[in-house]
Amino acid sequence: QVQLVESGGGLVQAGGSLRLSCAASLSISSFNVVGWYRQAPGKQREFVATITRDDTTRYLDAVKGRFTISRENAKNTVYLQMNSLKPEDTAVYLCVGSLYNPYRDYWGQGTQVTVSS
């Protein structure tokens, strides 16, 4: 069974940094795309960043220049380095891995990030 487990969330002051990790139960390079989404209370889940098998990255405009997605194949892990955090970044952050042929998404349980002003 494919599992993704997030870690690294917590409480941080505005301007601080956190690094989230998403550990997969299979080779991270098996996924065509791995991404981070977030969901704040009362809001819809939104895309944050993705990284493809060939290391192409994409970011939500609001996090460009502050967040960096990367992966470490040897540890089957994808990271989200978050710098210059803002209160509006507060949310549950979820990792998702997408496999093609057939298409299927695998979601983690999420990790809470809280940024205080």
Image (spheres, rainbow, N blue to C red):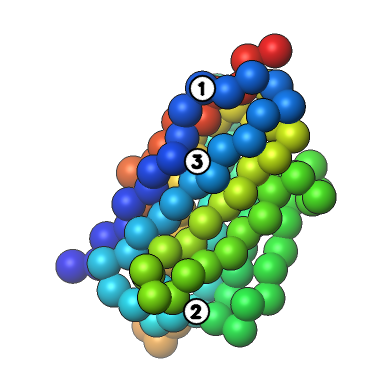
Quarter placement of the C terminus: top right
Please provide percent x and percent y for residue 82: 64, 43
The answer to whether residue 47 of the structure is visible from this angle is no
Type of residue at label 1? Leu
Dot 2 or dot 3, earlier in sequence? 2
- Please tell me which residue is depicted at 76% across the width and 45% down the height of the picture: 66
**Residue picked out by circle 3:** 93
Indicate the quadrant where residue 110 lies: top left
Which of the marked residues, 1 or 3, is nearer the chain's N terminus? Answer: 1
Q: Secondary structure at mark 1?
A: strand
In the image, is 50 to the left or to the right of 108?
right
Label annotation for residue 35: none
Q: Which mark is residue 11?
A: 1
What residue appears at the point 63 percent right and 15 percent down from the top-left corner? Answer: 116
Q: CA distance from mark 2 to mark 3?
A: 20 Å
Position of residue 7 relative to residue 35, above or below, is above
Residue 2 position within the rendered picture, expressed as x and y whole percent measured from the top left: 25, 67
Q: Amino acid at mark 3?
A: Tyr
CA distance for labels 1 and 2: 32 Å
Q: Which residue is mark 2?
A: 32
Q: CA distance from mark 1 to mark 3?
A: 13 Å
Q: Residue at x 70, y 22 (%)?
A: 14
Provide residue 13's location: percent of width, then percent of height. Answer: 64, 19
